[in-house]
Amino acid sequence: MIPVAEFKQFTEQQPAFKVLKPWWDVLAEYLTVAMLMIGVFGCTLQVTQDKIICLPSHEPKENSSEGPCQQLLPRGVPEQMGGLRQLSGLRNNLDLQQYSFINQLCYETALHWYAKYFPYLVVIHTLVFIVCTSFWFKFPGTSSKMEHFISILGKCFDSPWTTRALSEVSGENHRGRAAAIVAPAAGPGLAKAGEGEKEKVVTEPPAVTLLDRKEGEQAKALFEKVKKFRVHVEEGDILYSMYIRQTVLKACKFLAILVYSLVYVGKISFLVACRVETSGVTGYASFCCNHTKAHLFSKLALCYISFVCAYGLTCLYTLYWLFHRPLKEYSFGSVRQETGMNDIPDVRNDFAFMLHLADQYDSLYSRRFAVFLSEVSESRLKQLNLNHEWTPEKLRQKLQRNAAGRLELALCMLPGLPDTVFELGELEALRLEAVGDVAFPPALSQLVHLQELSLLHAPARLPFSAQVFLRDRLKVIRIQCEELREVPLWAFALRGLEEMHLEGLFPPELARAAVLESLRELKQLKVLSLRSNAGKVPASVADVAGHLQRLSLHNDGARLLALNSLKKLAALRELELVACGLERIPHAVFSLGALQELDLRDNHLRSIEEILSFQHCRKLVTLRLWHNQIAYIPEHVRKLRGLEQLYLSHNKLESLPSQLGMCSCLRLLDVSHNGLRSLPPEVGLLQSLQHLALSHNALEALPEELFFCRKLRTLLLGYNHLRRLSPQVAHLRALSRLELQGNRLEALPEELGSCAGLRRAGLLVEDSLYEGLPTDVRARMEGE
């Protein structure tokens, strides 16, 4: 017994395959059912009724032309055997058992095998046809693909997203046709105004169904299934080859059946002569037999042959269809024209073959399925899901002030840009990081306060209307991508731009040339930052030479060879050449008369003898030479009298020149993370010094003159070899931060209490040393 649940599952699965059964396969199924009914009917007659009835007959005379049972044969029925003469009135004394014996014996020996087994042959042949037709629905290598395809096809057909997408397309087409109808009505002729009014009346486009979040997620999962299924099925053509083989097999089977049926159908005879050596048992050796079902079987055989011929024609048409059309590729050309989705890709191999079969069943299946092959449709669905997930209220909770003080919204790792972003009218900065498929709609014009845009690995498309909106409004743009040629061209047309920050690599073949798009449109650009692997300063930098104030080149270790373009930047105030592989200070820098800050971090500088040439940069106030390999500072550093900040940390300095004390304007000196063992007493001449960083060196003592720097606010002495701190520290009344941890101090001087600006939070020292201070000193430090 088959359980009810399994039978129900079987009945539900079988009709699903009808999508992959074209009309000729359906016709063939009906023909096989008719042939099977013929066979079953013939087998039933064969079992329920007498098969053959025989009567004894005398031997015919020699040289007689009259055949056996000749007078009994109906007109038109051929005679099967000769050798018997018709007798009339023959009497015999055979009993019933002897007749039954003769009937069975003559049935087995005299009756032709085709007339004998015709019903069974029909059943067997029909079952073979059925197996050949349904084998690929059961074969593991094909059934799994077809079941998966039908499952996905059915879900795509019934998905609400399919209806919505097609409705939107039809609505767009409808609006296009309506515009075409209305356009003639706007002609100059006043006499036709009435006709124009009539032509303006058009029907409304169909309403677009709304999707809830659950339906949107289901459609999103369907897109992923279709992608994976396409990748898996397009790799082979087992379905196509299997269908060809089974069709060829059915055609061969049809020819074989047709040939031998036509040959042997005449062997079904109504009267059959039988000769058996049973005279010792019955007294007769010749019998005249009647095949009781011969007349019916002959009609059934002719009917069966006609069905076989019709079945064969379906096989021949199938072969014609298989070889006449390119079934290994399916093009959605007509669907593209109907729906306007021009990005629907053509499919190949088994995927294409199954779509060809489904198209024979109903082309609507392929039309609705094509929606899930379109990237445009997928992007629309992603956009809809994003809008469901990121509501304006949720986005407002993510608003924060950035370093520039602008109200910024930062979105990271999203499949797209929610439309709800453009409802935040107060937004001033938009930061998109790893956001895929960013397409700014016309609604961007609602962000009237937008001034800063960051696109970090987020390629964006900007329509012309949005470019016009941002052209004079956007002030800062940051773009980060894999290669700089991916930077959108519209970024170089934002004429109101004040800051541009680009990060990406030049292709290896273009790294030395370092060609950047023209910057001529950026008339107000003041800051340009470029992080790449350029071999030279891009020539297009000269386009903004008259107004560029800050240039930052971060080369990630790639050597920057050509710097001549820097000489043209007469208005440049800040220059950063970070990780550019420089071994010497570039001479092009010394011609920048307006330069105020220079940063040469993370290079390979060993000698800075060229520092003398900085006297030509009379406005230079900040010099950053940190994270290099500088071993000493030349004596002519004294020429930099206007220098206010000097960064020399993370180098290989072991001493400082005494001439450094002649830099009387120096307010910040950072020589941390070096190998200094001592300080020159002339450091006390730096009366403007406010910040001194000496941490992570090898200092064993400090000169007393250091404490003459009465304006010193920050003194970092951590991680040295100091054994004591001079009581002269009391003269540093402006000191607010003192770092002493990591030394060899045994105690702290109580004169620290005289440093009026120093508090416990600003004193970085071991707790044991701090506890050694007098109670009143600690109370004063912790009091306020």
Image (cartoon, helix red, strand yellow):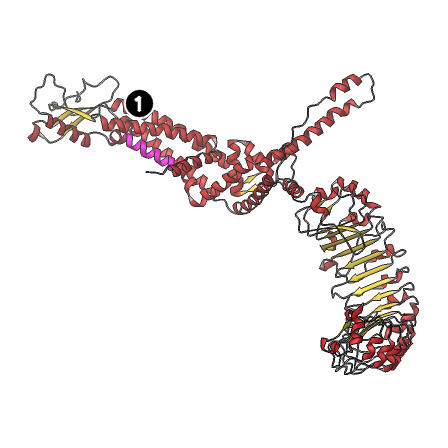
Instruction: Confirm whether residue 315 shows in the render.
Output: yes
Residue 463: % across, % down? 76, 42
> Which secondary structure class fits the magenta region best?
helix
**Tally of marks:** 1
Q: Quadrant of residue 174?
A: top right
The three-letter amino acid code for the residue at tag 1 is: Lys
10 Å crowding of disc 1: few (<14), some (14-19), many (20+) = few
Residue at image point 86% right, 82% down: 704
Find residue 554 and report its image quarter.
Answer: bottom right
Q: Which sits in the foreground, 728 or 647?
A: 728
Image x and y of residue 178, in percent: 72, 26
Is residue 622 on the magenta stretch? no
- Name the residue nearer the viewer: 163 or 65: 163
Question: Can you see residue 326?
Answer: no
> Which residue lies under the disc numbered 1?
299
**Horizontal placement of 637 versus 333: left or right?**
right
Residue 337 vs residue 418, the one in the foreground: 418
What is the quadrant of the C terminus in the image? bottom right
Q: Is residue 127 magenta?
A: yes
Image location (x, y in percent) of residue 388 = 65, 41
Examine the image and state in which quarter residue 242 appears: top left
Identify the residue at horizontal 37%, vertical 35% (top origin).
Answer: 129
Residue at 24% across / 17% down in the picture?
75
The residue segment tinted magenta is 118-131
Q: Quadrant of the N terminus?
A: top left
Secondary-structure class at tag 1: helix
Nearer to me, 309 or 219: 219
